Image: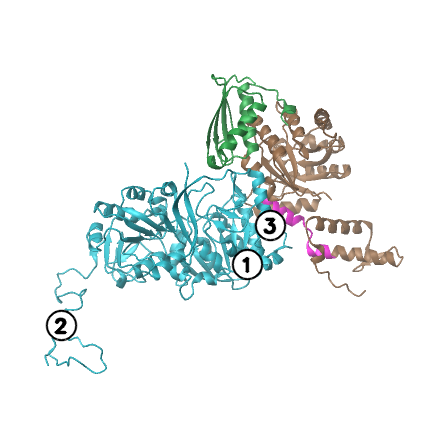
C-alpha cells in the first residue's frame, strides 16, 4: 500500500470508517492559511481588498443576483450608495436589492433603478423621493415589504438567498471581527446585519475604522467574512444617531402619553417584573418618562426592555428600574454608549428578536408594547407603511412582530393630523392585522378592541375617555370632513408580507 | 355645582390649538382676542374664533372669549361678533369700575336682541388687573346679573403696583382677598391668575394649594399640562371623603334619634361643618370620583 | 364686495391656511389651490371656497390658497379675513355671517 504524504501506511479501506482520503500535505487542503511560514516580511493574514470594486469582483457578483444591506446607519448611511455606484460602474444589472430598510439617504437608488442595475427591492420600508417614485410606478416588479422578523425568517429558511451581503461596520479588524460599538460611525447594535453575515453566500465588510486584531467583543465573526474594504467614511454621524433626545413639550403628545401610561398602569399587565418595548417617537419617549414615575411610586422594576433601545430606556436601566436590555437597534448616542459598556445591555440579532419560525423569539416574551400608526381602521388594522394618500412613506418594521407577541399592544396616535384622520373606515394598507391590536390611545379618547373585554373591564372605571373605535372614527370624520377616496391604477407596486411569509396586502400605483 | 377649576388660555389666532382645545379637559377654555393677538391680526382672530365657536363641538367644556376692552378700537366689534357666536361667557379684561361692566352688559344685550338670542344667555366674567379694579371689586361684582365670576390678572396688577411678582406672592395677597370677598358676597366664582413658569411643577403646586386653601374656585392656566395638576389638587382626597361621610352619617343618626346634636370623634358637629361635608361629597362626585368604590372606614363603636 | 387691494390672511403653520385675494381683471372667480391634502380634499376645498365667495357676493376674484391641512372653519375664517382686508371694510356685517 502506498504511503501518504507523511510517510505513513494507510489502508484504502478501513472497516467502520466511511471514506478514506489519504493525507496530501499540511498546506494542500487548507486554502486560507499561509503557504509559507517564517517570513517576517510578508503582510499579516488579512481579508482586506484594495477597493470596493475589487471586493465586488472577487465576490463574483453577477447579473440577477441578490445583494443585501442593513440600515443600522439610518439616515447617515453612505455604504449602500457607495457600493451601488461601484456595481453600476461595473455594468452589473438586474439585481435584487434586499436592505433591511431604506431611508432618506437612499435617494440615489432611483438612478440605479432607472438604469436597470436594480430591478427588484425587498425591504421593510421606503421613504421620501424613492418611496414616492415607486408609488408612481418606478419599478416593474412590486417591492416586497416584510417585517423585521419576516426578513430574518426568509433569510434563515433560504426563501430569500442573499448572494452578497455588503455590511457597513463601524469597527472591524483585518480578519473580519466587527461590531457597532466604536469608531467615528458607531451605531450600536448590528442586529439586522448579523443574520446576513451568517447566511449570505459572500460577506463583504466595509469599514472606516480598522482596529487591532482580534476586535472583541464582536457581533460579526471572522469566520463569516470573505472580504473587507476600508473606506474613508461609512456614515454621517449626524444622521446615524441623535444626541440625547429631550422629552417633547408638545401638549398633545404629552396628553396622549399620559393616557397611555394610565392604560398601562391599570391594564393588568404592569406588575413587578413586567417587560416592555417602546418606539423612538416623541410620544413613546414621554410614555417612558411617565412610566418611570409610576414604577417609582409602585416600587416596580421591569425584567427587561426590548427594542429599538433609546437613551430613556437606558436611563431607566441604569437607575435599576429595568433589569436587562435586549437590543436589535440602538437609536441614539446614549444607547450606543450603553451597549458598548454594559454586559447587561445585550445585542440580539433580528432572528432572535422577531423570527416567528425559529425556536422562540424575543417578541413572544413582551408584556407591553407601544406602537405608532399612520392609520388604524374600525377593525383595528394598522397601517404604518403608506399615507392616507396611498403613497409609500414608512416601514413595516417590528410593528406586526411585537403586536402579536405582546400581552397588550397599545397604539398611540393623534385622532387626526391636520385634517387627515388617523382613525378611518378602512386603512390604505394593512401592516398589522387588527386581531393583534389591543388598545388605541388618541388625544380625543381611548378605544379597546372588543376582543379584549378583560382589558376593558379593568379600564372602565379609571377615568379614561373610553369610546368604541367606531365612535372615534365618526368623531374624526365629523371634524375633518369626509375625504375623497384616493385613485389608484391597476398596477401593483408593493406586496406586503406578514411575518409568517403569507401575503397580507398589496399596494397599487397611485394615479396622478 | 358648576366647576370652574381650570380656565385654559388659547391664543385666538392659532388654529392648531383652537381646533380642539377641549381635549385637555379643562373645565373652561378661554379663546383670547386680547393680549396674545397682535394688533394687525385682531380681525383674523375674531373671524377664527367666530367660525370655531359656530362649527366646532367643544363638548362639555365651557367656552369663554376674552374680548378687547370697549375702550380699544376692537372691543365693540369683538362683542358684536362673539355674541352671535354664542360662547358661554365673555370675559372683559382690565375691569376697573362697575360702569365698565354695565357698558359691555348693555352692548351684549343689544346684540342678543338684534340676533334673536335669548336675553341674558351670554354670561360675563370680569377680569380685575389693577388697583382701581381691586378697590372697586364688590361694586363690580354686583353690577350685573350676567356676571358669574371674577378673574384676577396678576401681571398687569403688579406692574400697576410698581413691583414684580415674587415666589411667596405677598404682593398679591390683598388683591386676592378682595376679589374673593367680593365674589363670595355677590355669589360669584373667583378665579386666580396664571402661573407662567411651565417648568416649575413644584412652585405651581404650591400656588394652587395656596389659592385653593384661600377659597378660590379655580385658576387660569396657560399650559395644558397644568390642567390635570389643578384638578388633582382640587379633588377631595379619600380621607376627606370618608371624613365627610362620617359627619353626615352622624347627623343622620342624630336626626333619627330626635336629638339635634351630634358629635364625631368627641367634637360637636354644627351647621357649617355639615355644609362643608356636603360640599366635599358633591365636589367629589362632580369631579368624577366613584363614591361607591371608596371603602368606607369601619365606624368606631361609640 | 369690491376688492380694492390685495388681502392676505393666515399663516403657513400646520393646520392653518394662507389665503391671498385680489380683484380679477377677467371678472371671474379664479381659485389657485396648493394643498398638502390635495388628493383627499382638493376638490372639496375648491367647491367650498367657491360657494363661500358666492354667498359673500364676490364674483370677481383671484384666490391663492396655500393650505397646510386646515379644517373647513379655518379656511372660511381666513378667507373672510382676507376678503374684508382686500375690501378695506372696517364695519363687519356679523348678522350676515351666521
* SS state under label 1: helix
Dot 3 crowding, Cα within 10 Å, few <14, some 14–19, many 20+: some
Position above or below: C67 against A79: above
Q: Give the residue pinned by disc 3.
A: A468
Residue at numbered disc 1: A296
Q: Nearer the viewer, mark 1 or mark 3?
A: 3
Q: Which residue is painted at 57% across and 18% down in the image?
A: C1
Assess whether residue B9 is covered by the magenta stretch: no
- The earlier-in-sequence mark between 2 and 1 is 2
Judging by the rendered image, the residue that carries numbered circle 2 is: A25
Mark 2: few, some, or many residues within 10 Å (few <14, many ≥20)? few
Quarter of the image with the N terminus of chain A is bottom left
Q: For the residues marked 2 and 1, what is the alpha-carbon distance in whole angstroms? A: 68 Å
Q: Are marks 3 and 2 in contact (CB under 8 Å)?
A: no
Residue B238 belongs to the span the image colors magenta? yes
Where's the C terminus of chain A, which quadrant?
top left
Amino acid at each position: 500500500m502506498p504511503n501518504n504524504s507523511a510517510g505513513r501506511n494507510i489502508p484504502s479501506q478501513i472497516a467502520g470508517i466511511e471514506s478514506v482520503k489519504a493525507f496530501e500535505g499540511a498546506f494542500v487542503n487548507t486554502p486560507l492559511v499561509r503557504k509559507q511560514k517564517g517570513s517576517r516580511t510578508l503582510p499579516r493574514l488579512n481579508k482586506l481588498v484594495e477597493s470596493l470594486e475589487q471586493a465586488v469582483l472577487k465576490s463574483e457578483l453577477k447579473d440577477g443576483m441578490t445583494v443585501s444591506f442593513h440600515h443600522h446607519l439610518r439616515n447617515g448611511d453612505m455604504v449602500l450608495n457607495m457600493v451601488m455606484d461601484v456595481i453600476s460602474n461595473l455594468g452589473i444589472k438586474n439585481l435584487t436589492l434586499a436592505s433591511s430598510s431604506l431611508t432618506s439617504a437612499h435617494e440615489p437608488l432611483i438612478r440605479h433603478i432607472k438604469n436597470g442595475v436594480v430591478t427588484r427591492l425587498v425591504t421593510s420600508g421606503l421613504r421620501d423621493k424613492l418611496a414616492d417614485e415607486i408609488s408612481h410606478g418606478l419599478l416593474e416588479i412590486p417591492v416586497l415589504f416584510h417585517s423585521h422578523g419576516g426578513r430574518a425568517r426568509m433569510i434563515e429558511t433560504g426563501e430569500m438567498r442573499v448572494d452578497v451581503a455588503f455590511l457597513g461596520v463601524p469597527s472591524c479588524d483585518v480578519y473580519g471581527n466587527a461590531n457597532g460599538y466604536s469608531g467615528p460611525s458607531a451605531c450600536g447594535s448590528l442586529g439586522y446585519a448579523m443574520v446576513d453575515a451568517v447566511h449570505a453566500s459572500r460577506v463583504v465588510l466595509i469599514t472606516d475604522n480598522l482596529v487591532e486584531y482580534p476586535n472583541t467583543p464582536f457581533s460579526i465573526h471572522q469566520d463569516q467574512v470573505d472580504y473587507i474594504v476600508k473606506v474613508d467614511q461609512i456614515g454621517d454621524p449626524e444622521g446615524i444617531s441623535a444626541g440625547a433626545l429631550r422629552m417633547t413639550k408638545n401638549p398633545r403628545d404629552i396628553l396622549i402619553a399620559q393616557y397611555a401610561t394610565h392604560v398601562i398602569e391599570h391594564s393588568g399587565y404592569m406588575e413587578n417584573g413586567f417587560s416592555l418595548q417602546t418606539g423612538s417617537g416623541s410620544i413613546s419617549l414621554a410614555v417612558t418618562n411617565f412610566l418611570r414615575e409610576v414604577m417609582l411610586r409602585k416600587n416596580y422594576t421591569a425584567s427587561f426592555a426590548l427594542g429599538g433601545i433609546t437613551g430613556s430606556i437606558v436611563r431607566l436601566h441604569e437607575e435599576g428600574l429595568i433589569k436587562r436590555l435586549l437590543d436589535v437597534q440602538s437609536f441614539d448616542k446614549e444607547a450606543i454608549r450603553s451597549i458598548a459598556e454594559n454586559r447587561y445591555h445585550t445585542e440580539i440579532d433580528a432572528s432572535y428578536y422577531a423570527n416567528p419560525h425559529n425556536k422562540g423569539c424575543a417578541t413572544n416574551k413582551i408584556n407591553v408594547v407601544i406602537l405608532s400608526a399612520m392609520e388604524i381602521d374600525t377593525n383595528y388594522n394598522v397601517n404604518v407603511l403608506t399615507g392616507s394618500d396611498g403613497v409609500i412613506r414608512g416601514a413595516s418594521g417590528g410593528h406586526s412582530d411585537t403586536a402579536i407577541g405582546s400581552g397588550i399592544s397599545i397604539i398611540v396616535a393623534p385622532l387626526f393630523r391636520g385634517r387627515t384622520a388617523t382613525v378611518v373606515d378602512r386603512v390604505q394598507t394593512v401592516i398589522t392585522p387588527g386581531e393583534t391590536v389591543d388598545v388605541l390611545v388618541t388625544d380625543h379618547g381611548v378605544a379597546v378592541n372588543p376582543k379584549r373585554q378583560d382589558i376593558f373591564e379593568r379600564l372602565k372605571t379609571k377615568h379614561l375617555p373610553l369610546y368604541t373605535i367606531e365612535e372615534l372614527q365618526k368623531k374624526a370624520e365629523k371634524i375633518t370632513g369626509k375625504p375623497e377616496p384616493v385613485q389608484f391604477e391597476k398596477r401593483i407596486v408593493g406586496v406586503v408580507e406578514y411575518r409568517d411569509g403569507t401575503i397580507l396586502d398589496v399596494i397599487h400605483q397611485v394615479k396622478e | 355645582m358648576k366647576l370652574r377649576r381650570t380656565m385654559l388660555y388659547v391664543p385666538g389666532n392659532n388654529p392648531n390649538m383652537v381646533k380642539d382645545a377641549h381635549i385637555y379637559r379643562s373645565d373652561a377654555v378661554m379663546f383670547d382676542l386680547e393680549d396674545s393677538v397682535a394688533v394687525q391680526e385682531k380681525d383674523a382672530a375674531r373671524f377664527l374664533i367666530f367660525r370655531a365657536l359656530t362649527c366646532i363641538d367643544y363638548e362639555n367644556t365651557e367656552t369663554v372669549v376674552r374680548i378687547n376692552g370697549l375702550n380699544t378700537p376692537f372691543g365693540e366689534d369683538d362683542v358684536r361678533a362673539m355674541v352671535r357666536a354664542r360662547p358661554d361667557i365673555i370675559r372683559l379684561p382690565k375691569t376697573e369700575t362697575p360702569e365698565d361692566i354695565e357698558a359691555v352688559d348693555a352692548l351684549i344685550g343689544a346684540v342678543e336682541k338684534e340676533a334673536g338670542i335669548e336675553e341674558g344667555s351670554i354670561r360675563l366674567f370680569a377680569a380685575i388687573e389693577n388697583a382701581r379694579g381691586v378697590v372697586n371689586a364688590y361694586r363690580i361684582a354686583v353690577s350685573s346679573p350676567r356676571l358669574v365670576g371674577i378673574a384676577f390678572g396678576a401681571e398687569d396688577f403688579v406692574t400697576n403696583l410698581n413691583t414684580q411678582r415674587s415666589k411667596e406672592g405677598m404682593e398679591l395677597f390683598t388683591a386676592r382677598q378682595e376679589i374673593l370677598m367680593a365674589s363670595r358676597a355677590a355669589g360669584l366664582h373667583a378665579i386666580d391668575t396664571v402661573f407662567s413658569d411651565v417648568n416649575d411643577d413644584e412652585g405651581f403646586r404650591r400656588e394652587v394649594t395656596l389659592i385653593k386653601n384661600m377659597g378660590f374656585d379655580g385658576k387660569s392656566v396657560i399650559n395644558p399640562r397644568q390642567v390635570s395638576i389643578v384638578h388633582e389638587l382640587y379633588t377631595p382626597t379619600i380621607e376627606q371623603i370618608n371624613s365627610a361621610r362620617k359627619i353626615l352619617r352622624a347627623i343622620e343618626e342624630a336626626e333619627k334619634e330626635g336629638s339635634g346634636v351630634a358629635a364625631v370623634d368627641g367634637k360637636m358637629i354644627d351647621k357649617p361643618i355639615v355644609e362643608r361635608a356636603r360640599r366635599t361629597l358633591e365636589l367629589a362626585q362632580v369631579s368624577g370620583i366613584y363614591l361607591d368604590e371608596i371603602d368606607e372606614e369601619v365606624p368606631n363603636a361609640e | 364686495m369690491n376688492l380694492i387691494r390685495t388681502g392676505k390672511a393666515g399663516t403657513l403653520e400646520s393646520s392653518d391656511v394662507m389665503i391671498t385675494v385680489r380683484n380679477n381683471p377677467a371678472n371671474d372667480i379664479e381659485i389657485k389651490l396648493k394643498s398638502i391634502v390635495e388628493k383627499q380634499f382638493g376638490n372639496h376645498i375648491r367647491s367650498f371656497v367657491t360657494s363661500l365667495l358666492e354667498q359673500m357676493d364676490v364674483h370677481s376674484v383671484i384666490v391663492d390658497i396655500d393650505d397646510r391641512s386646515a379644517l373647513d372653519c379655518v379656511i372660511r375664517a381666513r378667507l373672510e379675513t382676507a376678503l374684508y382686508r382686500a375690501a378695506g371694510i372696517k364695519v363687519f356685517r356679523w348678522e350676515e355671517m351666521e
